[in-house]
Amino acid sequence: MTGLVYKSTGSWYTVKSEKGDFIECRMKGKFRMKGIKSTNPIAVGDIVDYELEETSDTLTGTIHKIHERKNYIVRKSVNLSKQIHIIASNIDQVFLLITIDNPPTTTSFIDRFLVTAEAYGIEAVLVFNKIDTLTEQTLDDQLYLQHIYQEIGYKCLRISSTENKGVDKLKEMMVGKVSMFSGHSGVGKSTLVNAMEPSLHLKTSVISEQSKQGQHTTTFAEMYDLSFDARIIDTPGIKGFGIVDMEPTEISGYFPEFFKLKYQCKFNNCLHKEEPHCAIKAALEKDEIAWSRYNSYLKILEGDDEHYRTDTYGEDRAASDETRK
């Protein structure tokens, strides 16, 4: 029998059958996915083959095959740096929820997420959430960030779940597709899903005023069928986003605005750091590339997975202002 994985808790997987029934399944033995060292060989969104077991009081199943994935999105495992964590698979698009100060989302985090989405061939849309909470200053910051990413070519939405602003536009983009929601804890993923589909009653929590961070309310990734012909994968809040297995020379190819210029560099293997006649550094000096994006690129290139989380776009913006003097 073939089904679709809707929830993964690490040892048990909720699989939806072709008839629409949900069956709790376990994994048969160990899966080795073409050399991928993953903490979770089966992910939400996977199409699997399973056999039913009727040995206990409840009907369960055993998964014995994972179908080839259209795509998947990964990050470094939090505790096991040499392993990866597959967040979800077979995704049509991913919505990255961003908040300016409630909690703050850094450009480094945004860029790392976008680079990974580019690398795995998944369309990413930036959702600026909680716009109803913006002050005059944070509104300016939000519009500045939106301008940066729209200039690159990314779709951006401005949303307030509590005031139902922009929610209908988001729903239109999701019809007929499997969409993944991601972002830091506290950016309002579950609240937004509830605004679109109130019957789900997903658990939400408030932001800690002291730490400006959200509490983890979504423990495991889970897929939901929505009433307007859409599927959503809600994911646990992510603190950091470690980049997985990228060669230094390929990283700039996942920055679309760099990719357009990289072939104008004098050297084919230009890393856009100290090399002469670098088209990307020239564009940076002319303020045609955002300093925050270049800063993110350098940190990914250097493999800095620990310290980027403390960056703020205010500092990046100040650096960008310096280049215009």
Image: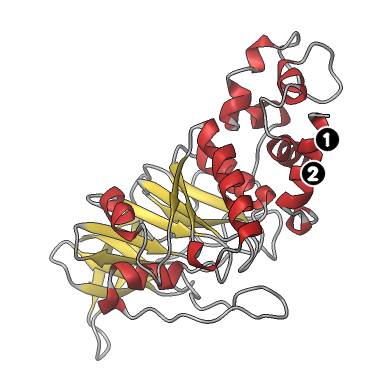
Q: Amino acid at mark 2?
A: Ala
Q: Position of residue 71 (x, y in %)?
A: 42, 43
Q: Position of residue 322 (x, y in %)?
A: 83, 35
Label disc, if present, on residue 272 of the rendered structure? none
Q: Residue furthest front?
A: 136
Relative side of 162 to 137, left or right? left
Q: Give the residue at mark 2.
A: 318
Secondary structure, mark 1, is: helix
Q: Is residue 35 visible?
A: no
Residue that carries the numbered disc 1 in the rendered image: 322
Q: Which amino acid lies under the numbered mark 1 shown in the image of this protein? A: Glu
Q: Quadrant of residue 282?
A: top right
Q: Is residue 142 above or below residue 14?
A: above
Count residues near mark 1 (Cα–Cα under 10 Å), then give few for <14, some for 14-19, many for 20+: few
* C-alpha separation, residue under disc 1 versus residue under disc 2: 6 Å
Q: From the image, which quarter does the N terminus lie in?
A: bottom left
Tell me where residue 59 appears, x and y as whole percent.
23, 81
